[in-house]
Image (spheres, grey):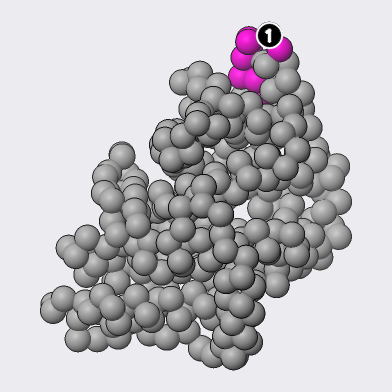
């Protein structure tokens, strides 16, 4: 197979990223949207994380980008050139089979509210752990607004180092608004952000990439327990409803109870435990209030016994609840009210 024309491929992938943003950029609150757009500008223009962005450039760039999205909203995703053929943009396996030899990696998938995601990046390295293949991406050539830093597809796990650095920087910037004494602040305090932003981001990225890897392994294990096809069908049917947010939160809790939290407790990595709790969404904390209580007990006593006991209990709890959601979906269809009520009655 002939080499893939990288410039053409990059333009096509970015075009598809722009279409995805045109369709789903409005999914964010205004505050989150503006923060993500600011960081998108930083990436596209090559500004460092600690650089002050030129306000007279950001505004016109934002207007131009939104105009482009308005023009693309109804467009179809473009096929991607692979050697002498063109491949559907969601056929990542075929595309990567040709890209790996050129030191590149590509991924495509669906996220929250069935939003499409694409990225193309330089391949940092890939490695095999048991029956998983882990692909670590470096400098990104094409990306969308959301840029999820980690994702699993089948038994392939994609970790995006650059996207993770940007996510961590967003967390740092958000925390700095009021510098609260909370879990996120404790995680950030473990790194030298006040004196060397780049070194701090490098160190924090390495630590949290490992935690993200554990979560993605947990996602695969959860899929083995639940059946990925059945779960995916339910998510698509309840997309854009409160039940989708709850179902995703339940599965995240299951994945973390199975793999992420046991791994964090085994290594005793306090900054990563702080970051884990600080990064929990409001819905996840609402469904699992005892986790926050156990975290506070650990923080005050430096004894993780209560956390370990809770994690052991949580494995069965979240698996049972996830199976219940699937059963209710099969029996009642996409009735968001029934699914939400079931989860609300089984908070832990």
Classify mark 1: helix, strand or loop: helix
Indicate yes or no whether the magenta region holds residue 306.
yes
Q: Position of residue 154 (x, y in %)?
A: 41, 57
The residue identified by callout 1 is 301
- Answer with left or right where residue 83 lies relative to residue 135: left
Does residue 169 sit above or below 19 in this rendering?
above
- Neighbor class of circle 1 (other Cα within 10 Å; few <14, some 14-19, many 20+) is few
Q: Quadrant of the N terminus?
A: bottom left
Does residue 172 sit above or below 6 in this rendering?
above
Indicate yes or no whether the magenta region holds residue 159.
no
Instruction: Say which quarter of the image contains residue 279.
Output: top right
Residue at the spot 62% in from the left edge and 14% down from the top edge = 304
Residue at the spot 13% in from the left edge and 79% down from the top edge = 2
- Highlighted magenta segment, given as a residue range: 300-310
Q: Position of residue 123 (x, y in %)?
A: 28, 56
Q: Position of residue 121 (x, y in %)?
A: 34, 62
- Answer with left or right where residue 187 lies relative to residue 142: right
Front in this rendered view, residue 174 or 288: 174
């Amino acid at each position: 197979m002939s080499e893939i024309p990288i410039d053409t491929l990059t333009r096509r992938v970015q075009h598809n990223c722009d279409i995805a943003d045109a369709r789903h950029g409005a999914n964010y609150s205004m505050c989150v949207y503006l923060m993500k757009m600011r960081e998108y500008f930083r990436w596209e223009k090559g500004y460092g994380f600690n650089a002050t962005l030129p306000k007279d450039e950001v505004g016109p760039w934002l207007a131009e980008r939104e105009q482009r999205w308005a023009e693309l909203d109804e467009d179809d995703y473009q096929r991607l050139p692979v050697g002498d053929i063109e491949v559907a943009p969601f056929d990542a396996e075929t595309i990567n089979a040709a890209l790996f030899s050129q030191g590149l990696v590509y991924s495509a998938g669906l996220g929250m509210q069935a939003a499409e995601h694409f990225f193309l990046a330089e391949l940092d390295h890939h490695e095999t752990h048991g029956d998983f293949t882990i692909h670590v991406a470096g400098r990104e050539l094409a990306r969308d607004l959301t840029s999820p830093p980690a994702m699993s597809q089948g038994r392939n796990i994609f970790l995006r180092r650059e996207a993770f650095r940007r996510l961590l920087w967003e967390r740092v910037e958000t925390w700095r608004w009021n510098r609260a004494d909370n879990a996120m602040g404790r995680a950030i305090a473990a790194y030298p952000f006040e004196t060397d932003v780049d070194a701090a981001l490098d160190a924090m990225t390495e630590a949290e990439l490992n935690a993200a890897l554990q979560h993605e392994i947990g996602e695969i294990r959860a899929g083995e327990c639940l059946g990925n096809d059945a779960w995916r069908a339910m998510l698509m049917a309840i997309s854009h409803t409160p039940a989708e947010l709850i179902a995703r939160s339940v599965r995240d809790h299951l994945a973390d109870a199975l793999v992420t939290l046991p791994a964090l407790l085994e290594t005793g990595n306090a900054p990563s435990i702080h970051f884990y709790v600080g990064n929990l969404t409001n819905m996840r904390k609402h469904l699992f209030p005892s986790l926050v209580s156990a975290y506070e007990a650990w923080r005050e006593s430096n004894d993780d016994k209560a956390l370990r006991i809770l994690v052991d209990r949580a494995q069965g709890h979240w698996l049972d609840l996830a199976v219940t959601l699937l059963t209710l979906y099969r029996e009642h269809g996409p009735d968001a009210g029934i699914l939400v009520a079931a989860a609300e009655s089984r908070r832990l």
